[in-house]
Image: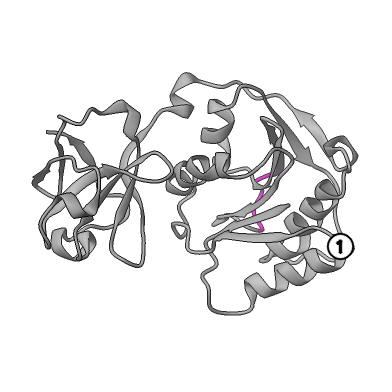
């Protein structure tokens, strides 16, 4: 299984071009579109979003993840192996959160290069072909050199900021819900919000926080948009209140 996670957006040719490469190079592998509206140009926010969704996919999955504002620069290209899953993409912090939280993790610097490598689309020309070869069963050592990394405990720490806003205006944060209790309130955009287990537990139009389906603290409004009501944006901070 190959899982795509990008900030490319759902419009335009970019996702289709990557999937065409994958279809040719690994036609037997299903390709799952996890996200193509990851935080644009923001590997830090995207790193926490990606880490929250990793456990939704089985061992052996290969993630092709591209949030890459430094494409074409001197930044390295990586394969990361973390708890029996592979991650292919830029060396800009995108994989550091999930690797720091993994029981086992190893980094590899990609040395393989295609015949044609554009300056601006490594997702298509480099990362997708490498992901396809890993999904076919090739070892990362055939494509990349081991890269030693020292992990600080802070690399896997939660991020008390909004990392994603969905189509309903729900605001996902980088805080894992297990760090809070049902009696805790959170403060965001000058508002103190109480916990609710489900949307239906509060009145229509009322904001609250709840543990979402991937275990993160999420800010929501019953039958409304938390982003609109509270004026929320990516990167906004929150705290216990």
Q: Is residue 76 magenta?
A: yes
Q: Quadrant of residue 132?
A: bottom right
Looking at the picture, tell me which residue is in the foreground, 13 or 211.
211
Spot occupied by residue 116 in the image (x, y as percentages of width and height): 85, 66
- Residue at 28% across, 63% down: 169
Type of secondary structure dominating the magenta stretch: loop
The colour scheme is one colour
What residue span does the magenta drawing correspond to?
72-77
- Residue at 17% across, 61% down: 231
With 188 as the anchor, is 128 left or right in this view? right
Spot occupied by residue 83 in the image (x, y as percentages of width and height): 66, 30
Looking at the picture, tell me which residue is in the foreground, 29 or 156.
29
Spot occupied by residue 130 in the image (x, y as percentages of width and height): 80, 52
- Residue at 55% across, 67% down: 8
**Label 1 Cα neighbours within 10 Å, binned few <14 / some 14-19 / many ≥20:** some
Looking at the picture, tell me which residue is in the foreground, 181 or 8.
181
With 221 as the anchor, is 13 left or right in this view? right
Seen in the picture, residue 84 relative to 218 is either above or below; the reply is above
Which quarter shows the C terminus? top left
Q: For numbered disc 1, what is the local secondary structure?
A: helix
With 55 as the anchor, is 147 left or right in this view? right
The residue at which mark 1 appears reads as 25
Spot occupied by residue 127 in the image (x, y as percentages of width and height): 73, 55
Q: Quadrant of residue 170?
A: bottom left
Seen in the picture, residue 15 relative to 159 is either above or below; the reply is below
């Amino acid at each position: 299984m190959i899982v795509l996670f990008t900030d490319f957006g759902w419009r335009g040719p970019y996702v289709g071009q990557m999937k065409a490469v994958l279809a040719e190079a690994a036609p037997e592998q299903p390709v799952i579109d996890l996200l193509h509206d990851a935080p644009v140009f923001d590997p830090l926010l995207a790193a926490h979003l990606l880490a929250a969704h990793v456990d939704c996919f089985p061992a052996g999955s290969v993630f092709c993840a591209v949030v890459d504002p430094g494409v074409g620069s001197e930044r390295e290209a990586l394969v990361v192996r973390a708890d029996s899953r592979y991650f292919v993409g830029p060396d800009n912090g995108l994989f550091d959160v999930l690797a720091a939280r993994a029981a086992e993790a190893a980094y590899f610097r990609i040395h393989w290069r295609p015949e044609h490598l554009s300056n601006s689309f490594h997702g298509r020309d480099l990362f997708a072909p490498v992901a396809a070869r890993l999904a076919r069963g090739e070892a990362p050592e055939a494509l990349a050199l081991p890269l030693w990394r020292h992990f600080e405990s802070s690399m896997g720490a939660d991020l008390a900021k909004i990392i994603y806003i969905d189509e309903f205006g729900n605001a996902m944060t980088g805080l894992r819900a297990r760090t809070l209790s049902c009696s805790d309130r959170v403060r965001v955009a000058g508002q103190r919000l109480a916990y609710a287990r489900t949307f239906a537990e509060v009145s229509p139009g009322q904001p609250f926080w709840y543990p979402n389906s991937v275990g993160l603290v999420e800010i929501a409004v019953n039958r409304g948009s938390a982003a609109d009501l509270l004026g929320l944006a990516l990167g906004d901070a929150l705290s216990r209140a």
